[in-house]
Amino acid sequence: MIYKRGKIYWYKFMWKGEIVRESTKQGNDKVARQMESAHRTSLAKGEVGIRERRPVPTLGDFIDKRFEPWARATFESSAPKTWRDFYKVGVRAIKEFKELANLRLDEITSERAAEFGAYRQSKGRKISTVNSSLRVLRRILGLAVEWGVIESAPKIKKLPGERHREHVVTHEEEARYLTVAQEPLGSVAAVLVDTGLRPEECFRLRWESITWSNGRHGTFLVTHGKTAAARRLLPMTPRVRAILENRWEGDGKPAEGWVWPAPTLSGHLEPSSIKKQHSKALKASGVRPFVLYSLRHTFLTRLGESGCDAWTLARIAGHSSIAVSARYVHPSTDAVFAAVDRLGGHKIGHTVKQDSDSEELKKLLPS
């Protein structure tokens, strides 16, 4: 029989009491059947015996020879922060735990993954840091399945209690914070809360990506981000337009280059560049402490509350999954009824009793 795992067909059959199972590395079912038939024929002719299973590499070997080169090639240039702070750190943590790194990929179980998480916690790592390592492990095993090295991967459970960067800054807190924030932090923070950019996307903005004449106030193109969906064209608000235009004119109206240049290895602002400014602004403003990423969450929360649908919000935010965007969209009861009314069906066959029942139902639904 042949079966599909992802986009690749595998075949499986019994031969002299032993199971023969192999990946065809093909996405065409006809070719897969032909390969299965050829294997059966070669066995029947006695040209080969039961093939030995290809040895499954250890987790450490798979990381060194296949996963790490893939991650470096995929993210080091296009998304250096993802490579440096997620994959590189996660891989190092996994390889340090020899009890896991020395296991073959097909020996790794959910229990072994939990032991790894417990080990990381015992070293004083925060829950968010441990979960980040577990996400890397899950990605490694997922690719091992996708590439046909193992047939299935265990379920990797994250630790509960992770603190998320979901603090929403109020308008009053925003005003107090921006009043005391020094430059360039003040400008960066205002851009973040008005556009919903990820901080690293904002830091990597370039002048050649900005068009002053598009839309009502101009647009800018986000060219780098966490996923392919991060590449998007966004409109500027009047405040963002004023900030960027003043900065552009002050720099002599450059045709290209970083919007936020800095004396760093990358040539542009990095989180460390404005860390001290952020700490001072929090202390001086007296607002509840938050991380810069919270300004993105604040923008998206406000966008969802304004009535923006999940699909549009996903496009603006650069989300790769609509499920993430849906967390910000909470339609009220009035919005639900208004959406149905817009279909026009309320004009057909309604009676006073039906309208009364509708009002009663509306009272029972949560607002």
Image (spheres, rainbow, N blue to C red):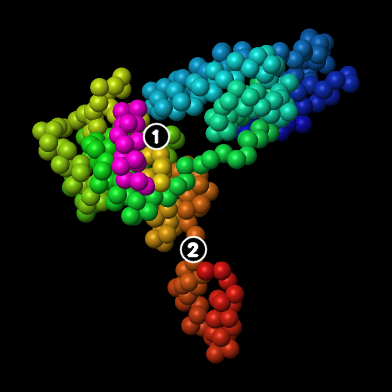
Is residue 338 shown above or below 196?
below
* Amino acid tagged 2: Pro
Residue beneath the point at 79% across and 21% down: 20
Location of mark 2 (residue): 331
The location of residue 143, given as percent across then percent down, is 59, 26
Residue beneath the point at 44% across and 23% down: 84
Lateral position of residue 145 relative to residue 308, left or right: right
Nearer the viewer's eye, disc 1 or disc 2?
2
The location of residue 224, given as percent across then percent down, is 36, 33
Is residue 259 shown above or below 39?
below
* Amino acid tagged 1: Gly
Residue stretch rendered in magenta on the structure: 272-287
Determine if residue 21 is in view: yes
Q: Nearer the viewer, residue 169 or 342?
A: 169
Residue beneath the point at 50% across and 47% down: 324
Q: Nearer the viewer, residue 230 or 263?
A: 263
